Amino acid sequence: MTTLADLQVSSLGPSRHDSPLGSYVAGRKTNEYYVSEDDRVLYDDTISLLEQRGEPVERWPSFEPGGPRARIFHDPATTHVGVVTCGGLCPGLNDVIRAVTLELYTHYGVTRVTGFRNGYAGLVPELGFEPVTLTPGLVGSINERGGTILGTSRGAQDPAVIVDRLVELEVDALIVIGGDGSMHGAHRIVEEIADRGLEIGVVGIPKTIDNDIPHIGQSFGFATAFAEAAKAITAAHVEAESAENGVGLVKVMGRHAGFIACYSALANHDADFVLIPEVPFSIDGENGLLRSLARRVREHGSAVIVLAEGAGQEHVRATGKSDASGNSRLGDIATIVREAIEDDFRERGEPLTLKFLEPGYGIRAVPADASDSVYCARLAQVAVHAAMAGRTDMVVGRRRHRFVHVPIPLVIERRHSVSPDGDLWLSVLESTAQPLDMS
Amino acid sequence: MTTLADLQVSSLGPSRHDSPLGSYVAGRKTNEYYVSEDDRVLYDDTISLLEQRGEPVERWPSFEPGGPRARIFHDPATTHVGVVTCGGLCPGLNDVIRAVTLELYTHYGVTRVTGFRNGYAGLVPELGFEPVTLTPGLVGSINERGGTILGTSRGAQDPAVIVDRLVELEVDALIVIGGDGSMHGAHRIVEEIADRGLEIGVVGIPKTIDNDIPHIGQSFGFATAFAEAAKAITAAHVEAESAENGVGLVKVMGRHAGFIACYSALANHDADFVLIPEVPFSIDGENGLLRSLARRVREHGSAVIVLAEGAGQEHVRATGKSDASGNSRLGDIATIVREAIEDDFRERGEPLTLKFLEPGYGIRAVPADASDSVYCARLAQVAVHAAMAGRTDMVVGRRRHRFVHVPIPLVIERRHSVSPDGDLWLSVLESTAQPLDMS
Amino acid sequence: MTTLADLQVSSLGPSRHDSPLGSYVAGRKTNEYYVSEDDRVLYDDTISLLEQRGEPVERWPSFEPGGPRARIFHDPATTHVGVVTCGGLCPGLNDVIRAVTLELYTHYGVTRVTGFRNGYAGLVPELGFEPVTLTPGLVGSINERGGTILGTSRGAQDPAVIVDRLVELEVDALIVIGGDGSMHGAHRIVEEIADRGLEIGVVGIPKTIDNDIPHIGQSFGFATAFAEAAKAITAAHVEAESAENGVGLVKVMGRHAGFIACYSALANHDADFVLIPEVPFSIDGENGLLRSLARRVREHGSAVIVLAEGAGQEHVRATGKSDASGNSRLGDIATIVREAIEDDFRERGEPLTLKFLEPGYGIRAVPADASDSVYCARLAQVAVHAAMAGRTDMVVGRRRHRFVHVPIPLVIERRHSVSPDGDLWLSVLESTAQPLDMS
Amino acid sequence: MTTLADLQVSSLGPSRHDSPLGSYVAGRKTNEYYVSEDDRVLYDDTISLLEQRGEPVERWPSFEPGGPRARIFHDPATTHVGVVTCGGLCPGLNDVIRAVTLELYTHYGVTRVTGFRNGYAGLVPELGFEPVTLTPGLVGSINERGGTILGTSRGAQDPAVIVDRLVELEVDALIVIGGDGSMHGAHRIVEEIADRGLEIGVVGIPKTIDNDIPHIGQSFGFATAFAEAAKAITAAHVEAESAENGVGLVKVMGRHAGFIACYSALANHDADFVLIPEVPFSIDGENGLLRSLARRVREHGSAVIVLAEGAGQEHVRATGKSDASGNSRLGDIATIVREAIEDDFRERGEPLTLKFLEPGYGIRAVPADASDSVYCARLAQVAVHAAMAGRTDMVVGRRRHRFVHVPIPLVIERRHSVSPDGDLWLSVLESTAQPLDMS
């Protein structure tokens, strides 16, 4: 269980500069915009979950709120901020890069902003990727295109080499936009910095197309991504409805978490079955997929199945195939489901028109939609505030609509997933009317 | 200040039926999906705002959570539910109608669902609008079109006539999808029902294109609406940039609240000035609009102004015009601003290409986007759960990502608006770099 | 070469009724709208191609223009028109069904319009698909959804059974919306009708997602389809640009014709290589794909390949694999190209991030865009005019922006394809700057 | 009537260089791509219109086809090409600028390409707009944004000053992207060049949001524009349908030509009345707008009117208002129609919910859609071919799907408009079912 101690965010030290926001304001008292250093946001807000009820509220688990501070750690006149994007693409990366840059220039007057190219590789000099100087002119309209202008890559690099590079370039704060693995990497960089006693902050902005970062709400770009996935479900539904015994099968991303499958199915309203990693399902048996599907097709004339790529892994392992080297070869759940359906209809002597769609990378390479674009901009502003205030080893996130600071160790300890007992899955069950228990 | 008592939701009486969800489940214990009747969600989650710290947490202001109950009030076998949409259009109305209908049929087995046409007028027999029987087949894909299949109208009707009609048709629960005024009307219907001692529930689903309902977070359809408004800002920006001294002026909805202006400006990133009802601005003067605009055009070559229709009302009143009957005629702030800018550039001898855009009704007549569509579906499900559980005189809403029940008196006591000292307005200031104080 | 005789359209007989358009008009001479029965549209309009120059122009190959006739064959008061959609989906099918229905009701006063379900199967009573009565109310907004409300299927049915059914239902004209195979089927129905001496017309509206119908210009839905395909190319480009040595590979429809590949690449501007069935390419060799790709990636850092599914079939045959029954198994060109690229980069010791996208059915299940929607409506109107005028064994099409009648035998004699010497392919070469000869 | 002589395109002189395309090809005979200098495309292709039938076909009116020539006039090694965009915005301007630049660099090896800023003003040194050097890098993805990166302006400049500037910068060919007025300007520049005996070509690419350029088919960007306008009609329809006696009134661009009104109404299918400049209509009277509207609202419950801004000018003049200086003030037809409808319903004692929408500049500031983007790219390529071949005083256009060269005097002699007797207007009448004669 999360404890009070877990939620304390690290700082490089006491703040020693006034925020330049004050001088910017010209005649208006702006202290109201500042977040008080004493404030906290409760971790839980449901009374039945407030197990610490007997204790004073100040000792309940709570997050530090995000936002601008009246006093900051780094001196804007000299501060050098680095930005790096790591891992797979996600809608909104360019929005985040843009807003980080503009916030630093416009609000703090920081004019040394450097983008490292192709993920952590860009911090390893021998790999030869020249850093990019980020300016308001350069980032002006990059939000209109998907992807990341900095490039990205997967995989870790030696923390010692990275810290050498940060020292060499006099970077005071590194903003890492990346997923689970990248935050592990960020934590190791923090450790290396601490070992050397340096005053370099590392602030993360969690990125995950699968929405599987724990403790925070919906991750940036996720709404855009599931909206794209929903289009494929609509296409599958149109194909299925236009044929006799039409079945549409849509495979969406989600190796460990079924959020994309759930939300795209809810958005589209046309799915009859949603299969996700968190909820096991049988292919055979009375409540299994085949008989349930046969019933649905008989009643409605067609059906649509939304399948997360990580669903039904027990069936995948069962294929028992191995590759040339004798390693067990992971089957593809979509192929297994597809062939099972085709066999079943053939055996039952019924016609079948099965259409398979896989939106794939198409959902993550698009620009952020309007809501995600706002979210990215505000998240980036909060990250800059945290970095300037000297925070480190933490990420910014929005939990229950409040921007908060979360220690990195807390977001990498486990993955967030769809709770089979929660209200999201209940909504999916209500929307699809699929059997509650298909196992 | 909101008190504990204010947050208690009314009920028609003790629950007397088991939820049919249980029998639906077939072999899986589903109690986990049920919301406990003892549970509560804290009104505040920020420690500095928790003024009741000394008291036991059970006595702090809190909302009743939304969701399905194990025991319900109405008997699904006989329940008759009415649905009505009132006031102006908003993206997602058809999503809500659809999800209410499907939830009742599929989950609760309720098959008597009636839609009243053209707002409260549809509940007044002498106006002649025949009710519509809502079925899964009828509502199947209505979410793909904007507007409301039920039609809508503004204005109140006699509560006594309405309650007569509900009694005549044996309606057990009326779901009202509407705004501020409609919720006033709903409350008067509740009073009339109470006076007669009837067991008819009234559950509201707040609808507001302006996002100005208090106590709950973003209202349904709002994200879709500001995304549409953002397109007009983009067009204005493109026009402005393509001309020498180009100025784009975009008037968006928002009579009392500037949320659409703020969010569409944040989404689009291209606005240089955002003018909203909550923050006064001068037209003349050193920090006024004209000089600030002149500076911006000189620096950037062009500028874009986003203007909420209710902004700058002090300037409107100043026109002092009156119509034929001698009534004072409200001027239009867009015309005032436009003419002031044209005069100013003319007087200063500078060229000006001013392009005016007003997306108008175009932002509210579109279908809900994917995120709003999910939101509408889930909100409607929660409303149905509340109605079946016998709740009345309340609305459903999502506050800090939790679905909650809010007493109607609480949502009609005042309007929600953009706080000039809050983080949303700060984000706008950071994004536009407009002067913090233009008054 | 096309001869004069080939272009004569068949008719059921001399026209014997006045068009009801006249009476509809109310005081305006509307003859100007009517197409003269003596008029013709030249097959060629390029002087160098006009080989018949010595002959009088009346004898040059020419098409009959489409449009309303002053005198028509069928009596609107009693006419019964059937509609059927066959083969794969294509954007705009519902637009066509809608416009056929509305044109018949509104313009001709024909109120007997029947839709046959699931392609030709719907005309075979024993298969049990009940026909649908098409009315203005039913078709009102079907254009907003992709697919076909009538359903569709592939494959032929016995012409004798179909004609029996048409006779049984007293159908005077059958409008067939379908592709190559369906037009073969339509021609066999015409032959059966002729054998029996019946006065039933068969009018086709050519449907092909691949744009491969000869003699007419762009087919309906094609513009919508390639616009969707272009989105996948954009995504591939974004993925490729965001990685070190990123290569995006996009497989699009086009078994025999590369139009989708060409147009989507031109629309998107981001493709570096377009590979189509009509233009052979080598994988190895100095101008082959691998070396050309390596050069491009070295110069630009990334590259995008657009691959029609029917491209490079010579490489597919070369795989020589066979399935369990010993039948030779067609390889998939995308897999072959993908593996060749991966092997090549591995052998050359260069990093590679290859992302594969296949928009698949997603491009054909969407609703028609605005231009296609207009096109579908007008094409359907022309088909109705032709049917009412007693034309048969012909299709309507738009050639060089003129609606014309084309005999069915002419459109099924061969497929249209991208000319390697024509200006479309030249535009692709200019746009991609790929080697002119990659063979 | 157009004569043979009118269709001859001017040239700077005989071609004296080989096209570099040949050397680019590497081992493939590419002559097939070249357009023969002897070829022509017939002006008419309808036999009834071919009045010259008795004469040899070579003497019939015909256009010169567009495309690459084997021999060209300008030497690519030294050629300097200027580009300028004039007049109002139109979707696709950046596509054209991009494709002109890429075609020159990639295909012809021309590396001196200069963009003049803000229309013809950019060619007047004293106005101080520095020219922009256009490179492949600069134009890479400009097509993704609406507007024109070069800026634009209305109005003419002194041809002598412009030619001085062209001579000063050693420009060999000027490509003018603009409308009617801009082509008048271009022609005057040609005359000035001819007077001085210079070898500078002027090639136009006609731009018109109203699609009113004569002799050529649909202009670039028009399809994108009417698709945007159609969205406003959909919104109006949704608003109208959601109210009792709802009337949607949509004002679209089209001062002299009703193409946008016609096509957006056809695309959307929801319009009940389309009012355009070419077809007069009465407000009162039996077939006038008010009675026709009243009938339609009575039958359908709602109605949508699409109004081109230039429609019904006879009613506008009738208002007889004049401004402060005594000049007659043109009324706004939308206001006149709106007030007439409101008065009429009020007088007849019927409720009315009238919603007015005006998409305005929003339809012209968007990026080109996929089809227009392809069209722009190909049109630009043809313009570059014409410029390099030494053509002058001409525009490129696509007539009946063939790219052709048209002399500038021919495109500025009159405006293209919707023929009240043509098949487009007939389609509108068929689609709306409005009275054929509302005058």
Image: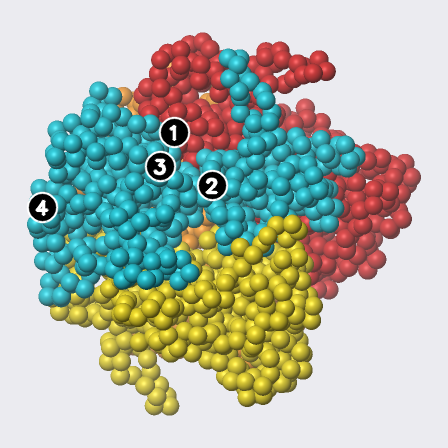
Chain colours: A cyan, B yellow, C red, D orange
Whole-Å distance between the Cαs marked 3 and 1? 22 Å
For badge 3, the amino acid type reads Asp
Confirm whether circles 2 and 1 share one chain. no
Residue under numbered circle 2? A257
In front of the other: B363 or D399: B363
**Percent coordinates x, y for residue C422 in the rendering:** 52, 25
Residue under numbered circle 3? A180
Q: Are marks 3 and 2 in contact (CB under 8 Å)?
A: no
**Percent coordinates x, y for residue B112 in the rendering:** 68, 69
Could you tell whether B306 is left or right of A281 in the image? Answer: left
Whole-Å distance between the Cαs marked 4 and 3? 31 Å
Q: Nearer the viewer, mark 1 or mark 4?
A: 4
In front of the other: D29 or B264: B264
Chain for disc number 1:
C
User: Which SS class for mark 3?
Assistant: helix
The residue shown at (39%, 24%) is: C353
Residue under numbered circle 4? A75
Is residue C130 in view?
yes
In terms of sequence position, does the residue under pointer 3 or pointer 2 come before the other?
3
Q: Residues within 10 Å of mark 1 (few under 14, many from 20)?
A: many
User: Which SS class for mark 2?
Assistant: loop
Q: Check residue A155 in the rendering and tell me which mark sits there, or answer none.
A: none
Chain for disc number 3:
A
For badge 2, the amino acid type reads Ala
The residue shown at (20%, 50%) is: A385
Q: Nearer the viewer, mark 4 or mark 3?
A: 3
